[in-house]
Amino acid sequence: MTRRGVLGLAAGAAGAATVAAAPSLTRPRGAARRDVTTIVLVAGANGSAGGDAELTLRGHRTVGVELPGHSPGSGQFRRSYQAPQNLAALSTEWSPMAGVTLDDYAEAAVAVVRRAADLGPVVVWGGSMGGATVNRVANEVPRLIERLIYSSAFCCTALPTMADYLQLPEAAESRILELGGAAVGDPAVIGATRTNFRTSDLKVLAKLKQVLCAGATDAEFLTMLNGMHPDESLEVPMADARGHKDTWGSIPRTYIRHTRDQMIPLALQDRMIADADRLTPRNRFDVRSVATSHAADAAGWRASIEIVDELSRR
């Protein structure tokens, strides 16, 4: 399987652990508090829209972006995906993700940021592939955002696409290609990448856990898998996701390095940080580190929450 085909597995699972119903963009009745920061969460590949209860309890608003093709009614969770699985059908059924682009993702996220900005300060967080969407949002509405937070996420600046960054020497240690055993169907036939996260193949499951979230318990790992959408866009990894100096580059930003990440290796995370800092030397990344895998385990997520909470109070 090619890097293009498997990038859909670069599972934004970093944020997939926080799954909740997608928000309504309808304006509420009455006045909302305007001294509360809204943290807009953009999940990575195959992720679901979700908020975070702990951040909410600490006094912040949290809202997940429902990306196109990832809504409960989008049709990704089809009968052939349920047990007993119909793998012949699953391998050929056309995907609701066919033709979905990074422009579509950005449009959905910008709508949430605009709505949140009506209520007060906004922080935008992205995990894994969600970083590409964050860059596009920051290019479009920089004045509405107080801070950008990347959690082991792609941040393209010197190179245009996520696929380009995966070709660098710093990506040599990435184990992303090892996840091909969970892939289903020909992307040219179904119009997307499709991953069978509900496989019963113990060897495939063991590989997924090892590469995605080696530090998690089996229960945490399976909970994450069952919340992930099987299909992901073919277009997004190949789209220009560069942050622009005068827009994206004007916003304070933080990068949370996942030091045990086997999907986006630490060397590649550091390369993206360095590229970004060269573009805007007067506005460099605030860099933090958490000892966790690509998809943060419970301890890694708690450590990340402490960082996000701190940054959202400034």
Image (tube, rainbow, N blue to C red):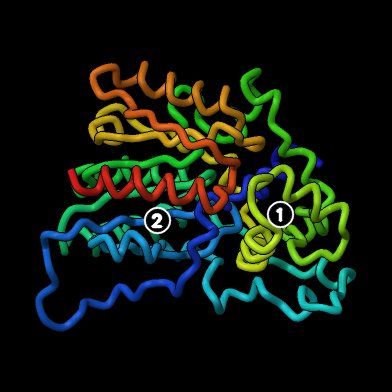
Q: CA distance from mark 1 to mark 2?
A: 23 Å
Q: Nearer the viewer, residue 80 or 300?
A: 300
**Of circles 1 and 2, which is in front?**
2
Check the image and report above or below for 30 versus 44.
below
Q: Are marks 1 and 2 in contact (CB under 8 Å)?
A: no
Q: Position of residue 272 (x, y in %)?
A: 48, 26
Check the image and report above or below for 266 versus 64.
above
Mark yes or no: residue 243 visible.
yes
Residue plotted at (29% across, 45% down): 140
Point out the tag, 1 or 2, that comes first from the N-terminus. 2
Of the residues shown, which amino acid type is indicated by label 2? Leu
Q: Quadrant of residue 194?
A: bottom right
Q: Position of residue 218 (x, y in %)?
A: 71, 59
Residue plotted at (34% across, 31% down): 244
Q: Position of residue 68 (x, y in %)?
A: 50, 64
Of the residues shown, which amino acid type is indicated by label 1? Thr
Secondary structure of the residue carrying numbered label 2: strand
Q: Position of residue 61 (x, y in %)?
A: 27, 63
Q: Which residue is mark 2?
A: 41
Secondary structure of the residue carrying numbered label 1: strand
Check the image and report above or below for 42 versus 93.
above
Residue plotted at (27% across, 44% down): 310
| Residue 271 badge | none
Q: Which residue is mark 1?
A: 193
